[in-house]
Image (cartoon, rainbow, N blue to C red):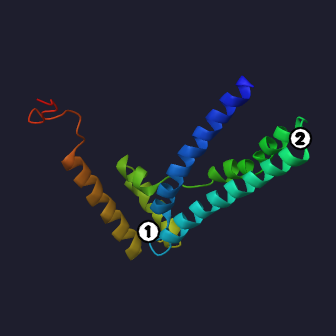
Amino acid sequence: MDMMLSGRFFAGFGVGIMSDLAPLYQAEIAHPSIRGRLTTLQQFMLGIGAFIASWVTYGTSAGLKGSEAEWRIPLGLQILPALPLISFMLLLPESPRWLAEKGRMDEARQTLARLHANADENDQFVNAQIEDMKADIAKSKDIGESRLIPASFNFSTR
């Protein structure tokens, strides 16, 4: 039981992280005209998955009460969507924004061109996106990351 609970904890943690990161990645690689639809579809599919999981769990607990299949079937069925997900994730490109932040601007341009302009790196949309990324990265560097609390901040409750 301890092993199953710890496994469920780590699986749930992984799903939680993926649920947070997937919309961000989708928003970065999707064309602006469909970004909202893609992220909405992703959230909708998470809801559908939870709905199906609930009914599978209910069905196995009602129909297979007392046997090991009651919990083994729901856990085993989770593998079915996970295997293609893992396989297809390997085919996804790096985030163009991440590439740009790492100084790999040529790769970011190639990725954007492949995703949005039939590999035409001189496309107007690709150039506009690259310029936006450069401006955002420069702005972030100018702002910097706040690591210390300024001395003017006083948190005491005098």
* Residue identifier under label 1: 121
Tell me: 141 left or right of 67: left
Q: How far across and how far down the image is residue 56, in percent? A: 80, 52
Q: In the rendered view, would you say 115 is above or below 94? A: below
Q: Which residue is mark 2?
A: 65
As drawn, the residue found furthest toward the left would be 152
Circle on res. 137: none
In primary-sequence order, the first of circles 1 and 2 is 2
Single out the mark in the foreground, 1 or 2: 2
Q: Residues within 10 Å of mark 2 (few under 14, many from 20)?
A: few
Residue at 62% across / 40% down in the picture?
12
Instruction: Please state which amino acid type lies under the numbered disc 2.
Output: Lys
Q: Secondary structure at mark 2?
A: loop
> 71 or 36: nearer the eye?
71
Q: Position of residue 2 (x, y in %)?
A: 71, 23
Q: Looking at numbered disc 1 in the image, what kind of residue is underneath it?
A: Glu
